[in-house]
Image (cartoon, rainbow, N blue to C red):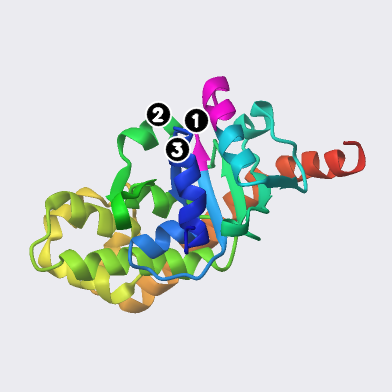
Amino acid sequence: MTPNPILKVLSELNQSEVLYLLMGGQACVLYGAAEFSRDTDIAVLSEADNLRQLTVALDRLQAEPIAVPPFEAKYLLRGHAVHFRCRHSDAAGVRVDVMSVMRGVAPFSELWQRRTTLDYDAGMRIELFSLPDLVCAKKTQRDKDWPMLRRLVESHFFRNRENPQPAQIAFWLRESRTVSMLLDLARQDRPTVTALLEERPLLSFALQGNDAELATALMEEEKAIREVDRAYWLPLKAELERLRHHP
Protein backbone atom coordinates (compact mmCIF):
# COMPACT_ATOMS: atom_id res chain seq x y z
CA MET A 1 0.00 0.00 0.00
CA THR A 2 1.35 3.44 -0.93
CA PRO A 3 1.23 5.69 2.15
CA ASN A 4 1.27 8.92 0.12
CA PRO A 5 -1.81 9.23 -2.11
CA ILE A 6 -0.06 11.57 -4.54
CA LEU A 7 2.72 9.03 -5.01
CA LYS A 8 0.07 6.41 -5.72
CA VAL A 9 -1.24 8.57 -8.58
CA LEU A 10 2.23 9.17 -9.98
CA SER A 11 3.14 5.49 -9.61
CA GLU A 12 0.15 4.49 -11.74
CA LEU A 13 1.10 7.05 -14.37
CA ASN A 14 4.62 5.63 -14.47
CA GLN A 15 3.46 2.03 -14.63
CA SER A 16 1.16 2.87 -17.52
CA GLU A 17 4.05 4.65 -19.28
CA VAL A 18 2.14 7.90 -19.59
CA LEU A 19 4.09 10.85 -20.95
CA TYR A 20 3.20 13.40 -18.28
CA LEU A 21 4.77 16.28 -16.38
CA LEU A 22 3.81 17.20 -12.85
CA MET A 23 2.95 20.88 -12.37
CA GLY A 24 0.85 22.89 -9.93
CA GLY A 25 1.13 22.77 -6.16
CA GLN A 26 2.83 19.39 -5.95
CA ALA A 27 5.61 20.55 -8.28
CA CYS A 28 6.01 23.67 -6.14
CA VAL A 29 6.53 21.47 -3.08
CA LEU A 30 9.29 19.55 -4.87
CA TYR A 31 11.02 22.81 -5.82
CA GLY A 32 11.08 23.90 -2.19
CA ALA A 33 8.24 26.43 -2.28
CA ALA A 34 5.89 24.62 0.08
CA GLU A 35 2.21 24.51 -0.78
CA PHE A 36 -0.36 22.10 0.60
CA SER A 37 -2.52 20.52 -2.05
CA ARG A 38 -4.40 17.27 -2.51
CA ASP A 39 -4.66 17.94 -6.23
CA THR A 40 -2.35 16.38 -8.79
CA ASP A 41 -1.99 18.70 -11.77
CA ILE A 42 -0.36 17.17 -14.82
CA ALA A 43 0.38 18.16 -18.38
CA VAL A 44 0.18 15.31 -20.88
CA LEU A 45 1.03 14.69 -24.48
CA SER A 46 -2.35 14.84 -26.17
CA GLU A 47 -1.86 12.05 -28.68
CA ALA A 48 -4.08 9.01 -29.02
CA ASP A 49 -1.64 6.39 -27.67
CA ASN A 50 -0.68 8.49 -24.68
CA LEU A 51 -4.29 9.29 -23.83
CA ARG A 52 -5.08 5.57 -23.97
CA GLN A 53 -2.25 4.92 -21.52
CA LEU A 54 -3.57 7.70 -19.31
CA THR A 55 -7.01 6.09 -19.38
CA VAL A 56 -5.47 2.83 -18.15
CA ALA A 57 -3.84 4.65 -15.23
CA LEU A 58 -7.04 6.50 -14.37
CA ASP A 59 -9.00 3.25 -14.44
CA ARG A 60 -6.55 1.69 -12.00
CA LEU A 61 -7.03 4.69 -9.73
CA GLN A 62 -10.80 4.28 -10.07
CA ALA A 63 -10.83 7.91 -11.17
CA GLU A 64 -14.18 9.36 -12.15
CA PRO A 65 -14.58 12.49 -14.29
CA ILE A 66 -16.01 15.50 -12.50
CA ALA A 67 -17.52 18.62 -14.04
CA VAL A 68 -16.94 19.50 -17.69
CA PRO A 69 -15.46 19.18 -20.28
CA PRO A 70 -15.41 15.45 -21.08
CA PHE A 71 -12.11 13.64 -21.44
CA GLU A 72 -11.49 14.19 -25.16
CA ALA A 73 -8.39 15.34 -27.00
CA LYS A 74 -10.21 18.20 -28.71
CA TYR A 75 -10.91 19.89 -25.39
CA LEU A 76 -7.38 19.37 -24.11
CA LEU A 77 -5.96 20.84 -27.30
CA ARG A 78 -8.17 23.93 -26.95
CA GLY A 79 -6.67 24.64 -23.53
CA HIS A 80 -9.25 23.13 -21.19
CA ALA A 81 -8.44 21.14 -18.07
CA VAL A 82 -10.19 17.80 -17.59
CA HIS A 83 -10.86 16.87 -13.96
CA PHE A 84 -11.03 13.52 -12.18
CA ARG A 85 -11.56 12.32 -8.61
CA CYS A 86 -9.81 9.13 -7.47
CA ARG A 87 -11.76 6.45 -5.58
CA HIS A 88 -8.98 3.90 -5.08
CA SER A 89 -8.36 3.38 -1.35
CA ASP A 90 -4.69 4.38 -1.70
CA ALA A 91 -5.59 7.70 -3.35
CA ALA A 92 -9.15 8.29 -2.14
CA GLY A 93 -10.34 11.82 -2.78
CA VAL A 94 -7.29 12.94 -4.72
CA ARG A 95 -8.23 15.15 -7.64
CA VAL A 96 -6.32 14.76 -10.89
CA ASP A 97 -6.41 17.73 -13.27
CA VAL A 98 -5.16 17.05 -16.78
CA MET A 99 -4.07 19.68 -19.32
CA SER A 100 -2.16 19.71 -22.59
CA VAL A 101 -2.12 23.35 -23.69
CA MET A 102 -1.61 26.39 -21.45
CA ARG A 103 -1.41 30.11 -22.15
CA GLY A 104 2.15 31.38 -22.28
CA VAL A 105 3.60 27.88 -21.86
CA ALA A 106 5.58 26.02 -24.51
CA PRO A 107 4.18 22.97 -26.36
CA PHE A 108 4.50 19.65 -24.56
CA SER A 109 7.38 18.48 -26.75
CA GLU A 110 9.49 21.44 -25.58
CA LEU A 111 8.38 21.06 -21.98
CA TRP A 112 9.43 17.41 -22.10
CA GLN A 113 12.89 18.28 -23.42
CA ARG A 114 13.41 20.78 -20.58
CA ARG A 115 11.81 18.68 -17.85
CA THR A 116 13.25 17.94 -14.42
CA THR A 117 13.44 14.27 -13.45
CA LEU A 118 13.55 13.41 -9.75
CA ASP A 119 14.46 10.02 -8.35
CA TYR A 120 12.19 9.97 -5.34
CA ASP A 121 11.83 7.54 -2.44
CA ALA A 122 12.20 3.80 -3.16
CA GLY A 123 13.13 4.28 -6.81
CA MET A 124 10.08 6.40 -7.61
CA ARG A 125 10.65 8.56 -10.69
CA ILE A 126 8.84 11.87 -11.00
CA GLU A 127 8.83 13.95 -14.17
CA LEU A 128 7.96 17.60 -13.63
CA PHE A 129 8.02 20.98 -15.28
CA SER A 130 11.38 22.71 -15.36
CA LEU A 131 11.39 25.60 -12.90
CA PRO A 132 11.18 28.32 -15.61
CA ASP A 133 8.23 26.53 -17.22
CA LEU A 134 6.49 26.14 -13.86
CA VAL A 135 6.93 29.86 -13.21
CA CYS A 136 5.37 30.63 -16.61
CA ALA A 137 2.44 28.35 -15.84
CA LYS A 138 1.83 30.23 -12.57
CA LYS A 139 1.24 33.55 -14.35
CA THR A 140 -2.53 33.43 -14.16
CA GLN A 141 -5.38 35.60 -12.95
CA ARG A 142 -5.61 33.63 -9.68
CA ASP A 143 -4.57 35.45 -6.50
CA LYS A 144 -2.91 32.37 -5.00
CA ASP A 145 -0.47 31.89 -7.89
CA TRP A 146 1.46 35.14 -7.50
CA PRO A 147 2.83 34.57 -3.97
CA MET A 148 3.80 31.06 -5.07
CA LEU A 149 5.54 32.38 -8.17
CA ARG A 150 7.53 34.75 -5.96
CA ARG A 151 8.49 31.97 -3.54
CA LEU A 152 9.61 29.68 -6.36
CA VAL A 153 12.08 32.25 -7.66
CA GLU A 154 13.25 33.28 -4.19
CA SER A 155 13.85 29.67 -3.18
CA HIS A 156 15.95 29.07 -6.28
CA PHE A 157 17.87 32.31 -5.70
CA PHE A 158 18.75 31.53 -2.08
CA ARG A 159 19.91 28.02 -2.99
CA ASN A 160 22.20 29.22 -5.79
CA ARG A 161 23.24 32.82 -5.09
CA GLU A 162 26.73 31.94 -3.76
CA ASN A 163 27.94 30.63 -7.11
CA PRO A 164 25.29 31.41 -9.74
CA GLN A 165 25.50 30.45 -13.38
CA PRO A 166 24.76 33.12 -16.03
CA ALA A 167 21.53 31.35 -17.01
CA GLN A 168 20.37 31.42 -13.40
CA ILE A 169 21.03 35.15 -13.08
CA ALA A 170 19.09 35.79 -16.28
CA PHE A 171 16.21 33.66 -14.97
CA TRP A 172 16.06 35.66 -11.73
CA LEU A 173 16.09 38.94 -13.61
CA ARG A 174 13.34 37.80 -15.94
CA GLU A 175 11.08 36.35 -13.28
CA SER A 176 11.80 37.78 -9.82
CA ARG A 177 8.99 39.71 -8.16
CA THR A 178 11.10 40.73 -5.17
CA VAL A 179 12.32 44.31 -5.12
CA SER A 180 15.35 43.69 -2.91
CA MET A 181 16.50 40.77 -5.07
CA LEU A 182 16.30 42.79 -8.28
CA LEU A 183 18.15 45.71 -6.71
CA ASP A 184 20.93 43.40 -5.51
CA LEU A 185 21.24 41.73 -8.90
CA ALA A 186 21.39 45.10 -10.64
CA ARG A 187 24.26 46.19 -8.39
CA GLN A 188 26.15 42.94 -8.96
CA ASP A 189 25.60 42.41 -12.70
CA ARG A 190 24.69 45.59 -14.56
CA PRO A 191 25.65 44.18 -18.00
CA THR A 192 23.12 41.34 -17.76
CA VAL A 193 20.43 43.70 -16.50
CA THR A 194 21.15 46.10 -19.37
CA ALA A 195 20.94 43.24 -21.88
CA LEU A 196 17.48 42.31 -20.60
CA LEU A 197 16.00 45.83 -20.53
CA GLU A 198 14.18 45.44 -23.83
CA GLU A 199 12.62 42.20 -22.65
CA ARG A 200 11.70 43.54 -19.19
CA PRO A 201 11.75 47.36 -19.12
CA LEU A 202 11.03 47.63 -15.39
CA LEU A 203 14.62 46.52 -14.78
CA SER A 204 15.62 50.11 -15.53
CA PHE A 205 14.31 51.06 -12.08
CA ALA A 206 16.56 48.38 -10.56
CA LEU A 207 19.55 49.94 -12.35
CA GLN A 208 18.57 53.32 -10.94
CA GLY A 209 18.16 51.89 -7.44
CA ASN A 210 14.62 53.26 -7.40
CA ASP A 211 12.81 50.79 -5.16
CA ALA A 212 9.49 52.67 -5.09
CA GLU A 213 9.16 52.84 -8.88
CA LEU A 214 10.30 49.23 -9.17
CA ALA A 215 7.60 48.07 -6.74
CA THR A 216 4.96 49.99 -8.67
CA ALA A 217 6.18 48.59 -11.99
CA LEU A 218 6.03 45.03 -10.62
CA MET A 219 2.41 45.57 -9.58
CA GLU A 220 1.55 46.97 -13.00
CA GLU A 221 3.27 44.05 -14.70
CA GLU A 222 1.27 41.58 -12.61
CA LYS A 223 -1.98 43.43 -13.35
CA ALA A 224 -1.31 43.34 -17.10
CA ILE A 225 -0.54 39.60 -17.07
CA ARG A 226 -3.69 38.89 -15.06
CA GLU A 227 -5.76 40.76 -17.64
CA VAL A 228 -4.20 38.79 -20.50
CA ASP A 229 -5.07 35.56 -18.67
CA ARG A 230 -8.66 36.70 -18.05
CA ALA A 231 -9.08 37.47 -21.75
CA TYR A 232 -7.61 34.09 -22.70
CA TRP A 233 -10.09 32.22 -20.50
CA LEU A 234 -13.23 34.12 -21.54
CA PRO A 235 -14.05 31.95 -24.60
CA LEU A 236 -13.03 28.78 -22.75
CA LYS A 237 -15.33 29.61 -19.84
CA ALA A 238 -18.14 30.36 -22.30
CA GLU A 239 -17.62 26.95 -23.87
CA LEU A 240 -17.76 25.30 -20.44
CA GLU A 241 -21.07 27.02 -19.73
CA ARG A 242 -22.49 25.71 -23.00
CA LEU A 243 -21.32 22.20 -22.11
CA ARG A 244 -22.92 22.41 -18.66
CA HIS A 245 -26.28 23.27 -20.17
CA HIS A 246 -25.99 21.13 -23.29
CA PRO A 247 -23.69 18.17 -22.51
Q: Residue 45: which numbered mark, if any? A: 1
Is residue 201 a member of the stretch shown in magenta?
A: no
Label 3: state its secondary structure: helix
Task: Indicate the quadrant containing the C terminus: top left, top right, bottom left or bottom right.
Answer: top right
Q: Position of residue 43 (x, y in %)?
A: 50, 41
From which residue to which does the magenta span run?
Answer: 43-53
**Which residue is painted at 16% across and 53% down in the image?**
192
Question: For the residue marked with disc 2, what is the amino acid?
Answer: Ser
Which residue in the rendered view is the most extreme toward the top?
A: 48
- Tag 2 or tag 3, which sits nearer the N-term? 3
Task: Give me the C-alpha separation between circle 1 and circle 2.
Answer: 8 Å
- Tag 1 or tag 3, which sits nearer the N-term? 3
Q: Position of residue 224 (x, y in %)?
A: 54, 56
Q: Position of residue 15 (x, y in %)?
A: 45, 38
* In the depicted structure, whether residue 180 falls above or below residue 224: below
- Tag 2 or tag 1, which sits nearer the N-term? 1
Question: For the residue marked with disc 1, what is the amino acid?
Answer: Leu
Q: Which residue is mark 3?
A: 15
Task: Give me the C-alpha separation between circle 3 and circle 2.
Answer: 21 Å
Question: For the residue marked with disc 3, what is the amino acid?
Answer: Gln
Q: Which residue is mark 2?
A: 109
